[in-house]
Amino acid sequence: MLTLNNLYKSYGDNTVLEDISLSINNGEIVSILGSSGSGKTTLLNCLLGLVEIDAGTIELDGKDITHLPIEKRGLNIVFQDYALFPHLSAGRNIVYGWRNNPSVSTQEEVDDLIDLLDLREHLDKEIHELSGGQKQRVALARTLTLKPKVLLLDEPLSALDGVIKESIKDTIKQISEEFKLTTIIVTHDPEEALTLSDKVLILDGGKIAQYGTPQEIIEKPATKFVENFILHQLHIKRDNILKLFGDQHV
Ligand SMILES: Nc1ncnc2c1ncn2[C@@H]1O[C@H](COP(=O)(O)OP(=O)(O)OP(=O)(O)O)[C@@H](O)[C@H]1O
């Protein structure tokens, strides 16, 4: 279980995270949702250890990891731009971290990952020859060879369109289930958060507006902000789609 206890973070006078407390069970997918500037990336960076928190504690499976360096926390991230090495092939990117820590995964486990993510036929390709979805899967494979306890994904679907988006969503769900991997996803898209996650954390100005299952959020929005911001966006989407069909189908 990953537990955050009363986290605070400020930049000067700007309180970016205020009293963030929550627990995430092992194997759960949690989305962090909020508008621009609400503190999503800062929270992700605090968990990862890129940003030092001002107060509070972070525990992973009962161990206090608040002040551990990044590499000792057991969390790993796939950045929004995938951060792949352009001069290495897809295959070499995948094994890059694992080559330095070969005891973490066996060759067979790495092979299984390559197959699971459907990357076998792309191993020899240069990074620029891959589609957005393929790059995303290479970045996922590279991270998963290191067997993190918690996988952090920063806007994993924002650069992808339609069909690829749905297929990466399925892949994320499959990986989380298969490896019992706790997965935390930053997104600003309510639809993405609600359809992909076991739980959604909604931030409003650095505070928790609501933390609950998609059903709880849709059926019982905790604050006016949740109702207005989140559900309003979904209604706009729905109305736009219905308009496409004209009156006879509405
Ligand atoms: N290194 C920093 N120094 C000063 N202020 C910062 C720093 N990083 C973030 N902030 C401020 O913290 C607040 C939250 O930023 P953060 O990037 O966490 O928001 P976000 O929800 O991820 O936004 P977006 O969706 O636009 O990426 C903003 O007001 C931002 O200006």
Image: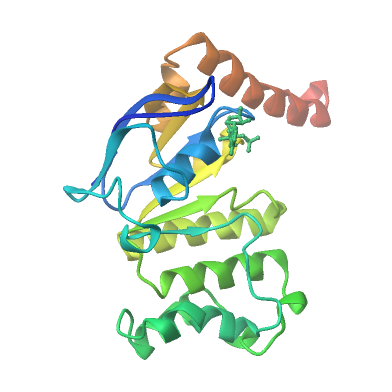
In the rendered image, the quadrant that contains the C terminus is top right
Depth order, front residue of 142/119: 142
Residue 11's place in the image compared with 205, above or below, is below
Residue 236's place in the image compared with 124, above or below, is above
Residue 30's place in the image compared with 100, above or below, is above
Residue shown at the point (51%, 41%) measured from the top left: 195
Residue lying farthest to the front in this orientation: 12
Q: Quadrant of residue 217?
A: top left
Q: List x then y, in percent, for residue 152.
A: 46, 53
State how the image is colored.
rainbow
Residue shown at the point (81%, 21%) measured from the top left: 247
Q: Is residue 4 visible?
A: no
Q: Is residue 163 visible?
A: yes
Depth order, front residue of 246/42: 42
Residue shown at the point (80%, 23%) measured from the top left: 248
Q: List x then y, in percent, for residue 148.
A: 35, 64
Is 1 on the left-hand or right-hand side of 73? left
Is 120 on the left-hand or right-hand side of 235? left
Q: List x then y, in percent, for residue 26.
A: 26, 51
Ligand 1 occupies quarter = top right
Q: Quadrant of residue 23?
A: top left
Q: List x then y, in percent, for residue 201.
A: 43, 32
Residue 194's place in the image compared with 157, above or below, is above
